[in-house]
Image (cartoon, rainbow, N blue to C red):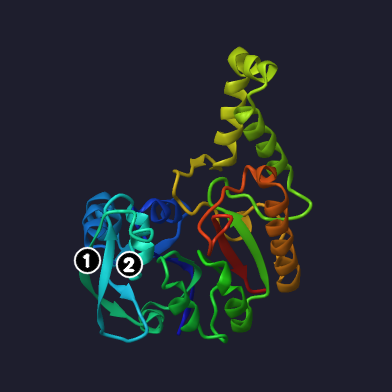
Amino acid sequence: MKYDPTLIYDVGMNNGDDTAYYMWRGFRVLAIEANPELLQNALTRFAREIRSGRLTILNVGIAEEQGSELPFWICDSDSRLSSFDRSLASLNGSCPHHEIRIPCRRFRSILEEFGVPFYIKVDIQGHDSFCVKDLDSQQLPKFISVSDIDLLDSLYRRGFNYFKCITQKYYLPLQLPLTAEAVRLQRAEWLQQNSNPLIRAFRKLGGRHWMERQFHRIRTRDGWLFPHGSSGPFGDDLLGRWLSYDELSSTYSRFLELRRQSPGSLLWAPGGILSNPFNIDLHACRA
């Protein structure tokens, strides 16, 4: 498999916001999306980029067996939740959803066809592990991100050396001591939620505009404003330090303890589901 430093994989393209950013950065993109409705939207949105060869889209799922066809559950209220796992797509039955069947490929077959990219973003609701399992430890991308913190051990065994846990809301790292950006956002969110009469007066007298600037600035990189729900920066553009496996493991445990001790102490790291309590992406780098 050939390594291509100009290529990014967007595995779980969804509405295409991440793909748009990667192309804005000058990369070619291979996007993978199981939902055929989202594919049709992308074909219209990126018609010019597809014609020029800057973007290729595969309408397939990622599975353990090449050529299989599997039931896929579409979440009717939020396309990002759609999954091969019905409980994830429906939030344990609380969201309307429906079933379709889609063709699937092994991730290894895609790597063999298109090459090893500079960066792989994986967010496919329960099937992230199939991508990690098919990576060749001798031919790794420079960077990868997944939406499942439980894949830390698998990434480490594959040969990734350094890691960051990045919150999806403001793209801040779980890191101690906190970054200056995290401290600033913590203060802004505290001011936004505080019911003290003096703080409320501050918000009415212009403080709300200051807070909005803080939120806007943290979601902006080099003139690009990341839409809500997008994966944000990647690689060396991420805030914070790259942590070793041991340091990230201990730091993550410490943040879990902070959340248990004082739920309001991490306002910039919003709560997620049980398998992802901080609503984070796990980024990994090979040295």
Q: Are marks 2 and 1 in contact (CB under 8 Å)?
A: yes
Q: Secondary structure at mark 2?
A: helix
Residue 30 is drawn in which quadrant? bottom left
In x, y percent, where is residue 131? 45, 77
Q: Residue at x 69, y 44 (%)?
A: 182
11 shown above or below 176: below
Q: Residue at x 54, y 61 (%)?
A: 276
Q: Which mark is residue 133?
A: none
Q: Secondary structure at mark 1?
A: strand
5 shown above or below 16: below
Q: Which residue is mark 1?
A: 99
Q: Would residue 151 be seen by someone viewing this image from the given angle?
A: yes
In x, y percent, where is residue 167? 58, 52
Q: Residue at x 37, y 56 (%)?
A: 80
Viewer-nearest residue: 59 or 2: 59
Q: Which residue is mark 2?
A: 86
Viewer-nearest residue: 117 or 180: 180
Q: Looking at the image, is mark 2 or mark 1 earlier in the sequence? A: 2
In x, y percent, where is residue 275? 53, 64
